[in-house]
Image: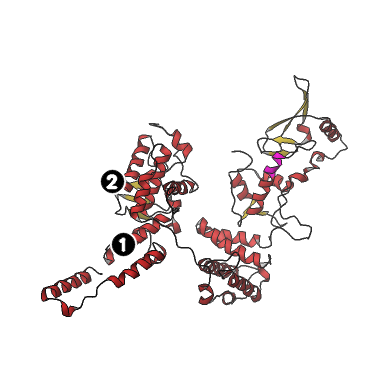
Amino acid sequence: MSKSYKGIRLKQHRVYSVEQLMAAYSVTANTVSNWVGEGLRPSDNKKPYLFRGAAVEEFHRRKRLTVKNKLQPGQFQCWGCQTSVFPAVETVVDYLAENGRHMYTAVCPYCSTKLQKISGETDRDLVEDCRNPNTPMDCLHEEKASVRGGIWIKAENDAPNFHAENDRIIHKWQTYAGGYSEKTIDKHLAAIRFFESNLKGKPFAKLTTDDFAAVRDELKRLSKAQAPNNLSASTIKHYVSHLKAFFDWLLKQEGYRRLPRDFDGYLKLSKAVLAQAAQVKQKDYPTLSEAEELLDAMPSKSLVDLRARAIFALAFLGALRADTLVSLLVKHVDIERRLILQDASIVRTKAGKSLNIIWFQIPTVFEKSVVEWVVRLQYLGFTGEDALFPDTKNLKHRIRVNGRNAAPVPVMSTTHAVTDAFSIASRNSAAKYTPHAAKHTIGAERDVRSLTHEERKAWSLNMGHDSELTTERHYGTMPDDRRFEVLESIGSKKTIDPRNLSESEKAKVFDSILEAFSNGR
């Protein structure tokens, strides 16, 4: 992996220990110490050091920018770290190249890459001065200011760029919340950082009821649809819920037990305030027939095309989330029993829920796309322990390797392939569907079909919902145009007056009513 660390992304709201940075970047503690020397500032001066994710990200971004800058005297370009460095003077060796040019070689102090550059007169003078025993050993590093990360350094108005007073207690909370899913932790942290930012980083140990009321008033202001950067009613509700959970935990921690215990009363917002909040836009989703047309129109020339078709099809067959799709293994699709084996110990699922999902009764083109993909993988040498949807690199190189002892093909760490599949499917459609549209389509299909109460319950459970209300409330909600169409059709229906019916017609109506009751409708 390149030492520019471009492929590594930390969570901006999270707090990381030295050990966590070492694991994330695959570096040693000495490298983290070097970063601190170059300008990465810890959250505070206490040890062990802690670092805000946003600060570490910004530090590496600025370091990468130094590649484009002109080298200073004594500075080398390291192509391993993808940045400019000052090596230890004892590693600098001067030699004469075949073309007569003076050259320097040295060793990168961070990744031990061999460095080389043409030595100018200024470089040679500086190195010779540094070799003088009376010169400080770090003389080459005196001009390192240009490499500084600039993180949390006091600005001219003496205001810090980040609030870090609460990072240590937030890091402790992260350990406590380790049992949650990663997305849940991120959402809680977003609410905590929102609270902290609105109080300009005030230490949590010094909070008063006025502080909670101030955050409530800010949420109240942001609830107005016309407010800049307004928040939806759903976001506000979640913020309040997450803050209550956090401060309930905080009240039990040493040094925070004197916080106002009635804080939750100061965060409450009335229903009237939430009613005026910006409403979440109605989710676009295709009907099942429209989804079938989209799948038929998807290209199928290459392995990547076939993978995209299978991803799109399986999303509808099992009403699966994007993260669940990309974390499935080949063995999790049982073609013979038409099952998706959602094993939460392996597959990334919401709330860590394991579930066996039978394929929904939808057009066979969806089943065909998935079956063809699994058969193709098996032909290419994939086994049950390999990823069902490998990334492009592994997909192109896993060609009929029989009797191998190679490590299983890993699942993808991101959901980009799912997003791309839905983007390809809807490229010629007026609406651009997201991966979550599949769950909405399947949720709406439950209401389109004439199902018994027991069948509707089974449909919801197969979607992973413990309650039918979850399916009813959040998936396949009725768009405005459909609502208008249904309501307008009501007036066109003729009302049956039983007094005008014959005896045989009355008997038929009575029989249909009995049948409806017996079926639970």
Closest to the observer, 68 or 358: 68
- Asked if residue 69 lies in the magenta stretch, the reply is yes
Q: Position of residue 486 (x, y in %)?
A: 34, 67
| Residue 474 location, quadrant | bottom left
Look at the numbered disc 2 and give the secondary structure of its residue: loop
Q: Residues within 10 Å of mark 2 (few under 14, many from 20)?
A: few
Colour basis:
secondary structure
Q: CA distance from mark 2 to mark 1?
A: 28 Å
Q: Residues within 10 Å of mark 1 (few under 14, many from 20)?
A: few
Q: Position of residue 243 (x, y in %)?
A: 57, 68
The three-letter amino acid code for the residue at tag 2 is Glu
Task: Please name the residue that numbered disc 2 is placed on.
Answer: 336
Q: Position of residue 257 (x, y in %)?
A: 63, 72
| 72 over 266 or under it: above or below | above
The reply, left or right, for residue 423 in relation to residue 187 is left
- Mark carried by residue 354: none
Task: Please name the residue that numbered disc 1 is placed on.
Answer: 448
Asked if residue 517 can be seen in this view, the reply is: yes
The three-letter amino acid code for the residue at tag 1 is Val
Q: First in sequence: mark 2 or mark 1?
A: 2
Viewer-nearest of labels 2 and 1?
1
Q: Residue furthest left?
A: 504
The structure residue drawn at horizontal position 51% and vertical position 57%, both measured from the top left corner, is: 183
Q: Residue furthest bottom?
A: 499
Look at the numbered disc 1 and give the secondary structure of its residue: helix
Q: Position of residue 309 (x, y in %)?
A: 39, 44
> Quadrant of the image for the N terminus?
top right
* Residue stretch rendered in magenta on the structure: 63-74
| Residue 321 location, quadrant | bottom left
